[in-house]
Amino acid sequence: MSKYDTYFVDLDGTIYQGTIPIPAGKRFIERLKGAGKQLLLLTNNSTRTPQEVVDFFG
């Protein structure tokens, strides 16, 4: 894994497309977590509340 300790990850179009998860996105997140990296998940989609994003992603 990279030398970076923390990653900023955009959700829309990277981890999921609309309501469909992107398999490679899930694998990427799992690899980062497995390597002990910190993640900050970001979205500019205001159609969901922060809790709805957590519930959808979680």
Image (cartoon, grey):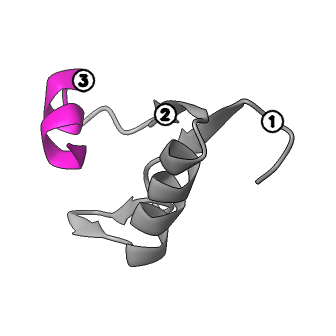
Count residues near mark 2 (Cα–Cα under 10 Å), then give few for <14, some for 14-19, many for 20+. few
- Residue 24 on image: x %, y %: 48, 74
- Residue 11 on image: x %, y %: 44, 48
Above or below, 18 relative to 35: below
The image quadrant where one finds the N terminus is bottom right
Above or below, 30 relative to 47: below
Evaluate if marks 3 and 2 touch, with contact meaning CB atoms under 8 Å apart. no
Count residues near mark 1 (Cα–Cα under 10 Å), then give few for <14, some for 14-19, many for 20+. few
**Pointer 1 or 3: first along the chain:** 1
Instruction: Decide whether the magenta segment is chiefly helix, strand or loop.
Output: helix
- Residue 36 on image: x %, y %: 57, 36
Looking at the image, which residue is at 37% across and 39% down? Answer: 45
Looking at the image, which residue is at 23% across and 36% down? Answer: 53
Residue bearing mark 1: 4
* 24 falls in the magenta region: no
Q: Nearer the viewer, residue 31 or 7?
A: 31
Residue bearing mark 3: 50
Looking at the image, which residue is at 16% across and 24% down? Answer: 51
- Residue 17 on image: x %, y %: 35, 67
Residue bearing mark 2: 42
Give the quadrant of residue 39: top right
Give the quadrant of residue 5: top right
Which span of residues is magenta-colored? 48-58
Q: Which amino acid does label 2 sit on?
A: Leu
Residue 45 located left or right of residue 58: right
